[in-house]
Image (cartoon, grey):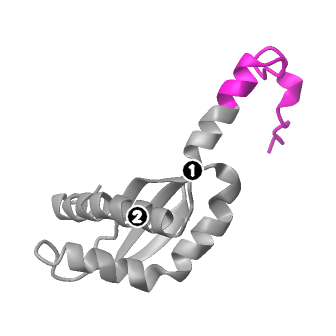
């Protein structure tokens, strides 16, 4: 359960992170790339912020995530400048890919398609009985 303080810090970071990353993508000449911040979770001691990103198109996601991670100090500094009136200490940023939309899409495709595990249970891995 997150405290109200954790939620407040997470929302402040999320709002500014969207601006910073989208501007960096545009300035970097990445046209047609959409980076969205799906979730930010802040640890109880407020020292680490886990930032979950959804990157479209998916094919560019791994290389973009690597670039974002390598620029973490610059991103942290930019966010710290924007939030200096709201945060005393800027948490360290950890970036992760949020593939939940991709996962949901796969589930929808499998339910609509011929490979429906409900109709054909043989498609599912058999569980070992213990």
Q: Is residue 35 above or below residue 87?
A: above
C-alpha gap between disc 1 and disc 2: 13 Å
Position of 52 with respect to 41 (left or right) is right
Q: Is residue 2 above or below residue 104?
A: below
**Main SS of the magenta segment?**
loop
Q: How many marks?
A: 2
Position of 12 with respect to 70 (left or right) is left
| Outermost residue, right side | 122
- Residue 47 seen: no
Residue 54 in magenta?
Answer: no
In the rendered image, residue 9, in percent from the top left (x then y), is placed at 23, 65
Please tell me which residue is depicted at 85% across the width and 18% down the height of the picture: 120
Say the numbered circle drawn on residue 32.
Answer: 1
Q: Which residues are magenta?
A: 107-130
In the rendered image, residue 13, in percent from the top left (x then y), is placed at 29, 65
Binning the other alpha carbons within 10 Å of mark 1 as few (below 14), some (14 to 19) or many (20 upward) gives: few
């Amino acid at each position: 359960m997150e405290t109200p303080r954790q939620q407040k810090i997470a929302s402040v970071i999320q709002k500014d992170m969207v601006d910073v990353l989208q501007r960096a993508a545009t300035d970097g000449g990445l046209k047609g790339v959409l980076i969205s911040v799906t979730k930010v979770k802040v640890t109880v001691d407020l020292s680490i912020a886990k930032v979950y990103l959804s990157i479209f198109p998916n094919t560019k996601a791994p290389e973009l995530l690597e670039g974002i991670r390598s620029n973490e100090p610059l991103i942290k500094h930019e966010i710290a400048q924007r939030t200096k009136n709201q945060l005393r200490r800027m948490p360290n940023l950890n970036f992760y890919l949020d593939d939940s939309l991709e996962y949901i899409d796969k589930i929808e495709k499998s339910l609509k398609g011929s490979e429906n595990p409900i109709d054909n249970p043989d498609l599912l891995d058999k569980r070992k009985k213990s």
